[in-house]
Amino acid sequence: MPELTIVADDLTGALDTAAPFAMRGIRTVVALNPEALPEAIASGARIVSVSTDSRELSPAGASSTVERAIAALPAGTRLFKKIDSRLKGNIEAELDPLPHTRSLVIPAIPAFGRLVQGGSLHGAGVSEPIGIAARLGRHAGAATIPDIRTQADIEAALAGDFDLLVGARGLAEAMAVAMAPEPRVPGIELPSGPAYCVIGSTDPITVEQLRRLRRRLPELACIAAPNGEAPIGLAAAGPLTIIEATQGTAPADARTVAAALARSLVRLSPPPGALLVLSGGATAQAILEQMHVHILDLVGEALPGLPLATAGDLTVVTKSGGFGDENTLLRLLAGFLEPRERVALS
């Protein structure tokens, strides 16, 4: 039985919340859906994370999907309910299948400038303070919501007695430190290429990251994909190919765009040894499912907040739409425009 199971409403969340454990040498696997949980549990990993892919579902649909995930776990499994660090999604509904007496709720990520004061979330990427209790709804009465300004505040909060942990990467980092105080020393290497970057997120943070990348590297080929559909006859553009979802002639929901992006990438047939950089949880989920990936072995992080995993002979880096600073994509990808060198990141 895993020591901890993380239940996240999208794949990037399942990965970035589990990454701090992998960075400390703790065997960690991620299931792309509840149906893949038996395989993930059978791997013997100490940490299992699962995506319920329920961010865009109705509250009832989201609750039902989380219930399926919980039903697949051994009785007595310790749970971490991952929530979005800007409190998006069906938080109240997804807590319904998780019976508990007292929860510790910490959406803060101090390293990214997202803090909690007086029960409200504020900071980087949060235009107006967000009341946490309102997002918890009927579960607020059982919740402890401490003020969080530093990572040390999170570590101190963990000393309390709670039967459910609810939070994001900051809380996961504190738990990982408690399980393995010494970080793993070796750095993480990206494969030498080719690399395929698929941008499905429309978050302003990701949009600015891509703008910076293109401004600094004007020779970069960036393929526009209206509503996720890249041009027929699309071919890889050298060592680095970027496909960006753009607005189409008619509106399309996130799942439709993600499915189209998945088809666009699969048509390129990434070869063994390729790197996939996938931005946006729905995008990452759709692409990997289209490629018949059910389980990811989490290695660690390529950059803070950018989990790196393997699936067979592919390397996968995912990025939540709201993570990173304006130069994150530039730091990650610039090396692929150099002459086929191996890029080392520590």
Image (tube, helix red, strand yellow):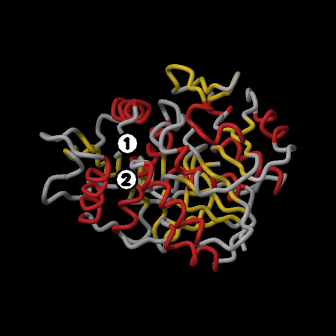
Instruction: Find residue 283 and name its label.
Output: 2
Q: Earlier in the sequence, mark 1 or mark 2?
A: 1
Query: What residue sits 59% from the left and 73% below the top?
Result: 40
Query: What residue sits 27% from the left and 46% below the top?
Result: 253
Foreground: 28 or 60? Answer: 60
The percent position of residue 163, horizontal first and vertical second, equals 77, 53
Q: Is residue 15 visible?
A: yes
Q: Amino acid at mark 1?
A: Ser
Q: CA distance from mark 1 to mark 2?
A: 8 Å
Mark 2 is surrounded, within 10 Å at the Cα level, by few (under 14), some (14 to 19) or many (20 or more) other residues, namely many
Locate residue 60 relative to residue 171 in the image: left or right. Answer: left
Foreground: 263 or 236? Answer: 263
Mark 1 lies on a secondary structure that is loop
Residue 232, located in which quarter of the rendered image? bottom left
Quadrant of the rendering where the N terminus is positioned: bottom right
Query: What residue sits 35% from the left and 52% below the top?
Result: 240
Q: Is residue 338 visible?
A: no
| Residue matched to label 1 | 201
The percent position of residue 166, horizontal first and vertical second, equals 66, 46
The percent position of residue 176, horizontal first and vertical second, equals 76, 52
Foreground: 275 or 8? Answer: 8
Mark 2 lies on a secondary structure that is helix
Above or below, 336 relative to 109: below
Q: How many marks?
A: 2
Residue 169, located in which quarter of the rendered image? top right
Instruction: Find residue 23 and name its label.
Output: none
Q: Amino acid at mark 2?
A: Thr
Mark 1 is surrounded, within 10 Å at the Cα level, by few (under 14), some (14 to 19) or many (20 or more) other residues, namely many
Residue 69, located in which quarter of the rendered image? bottom right
Determine whether label 1 and label 2 are within 8 Å by CB.
Answer: yes
Query: What residue sits 34% from the left and 46% below the top?
Result: 200
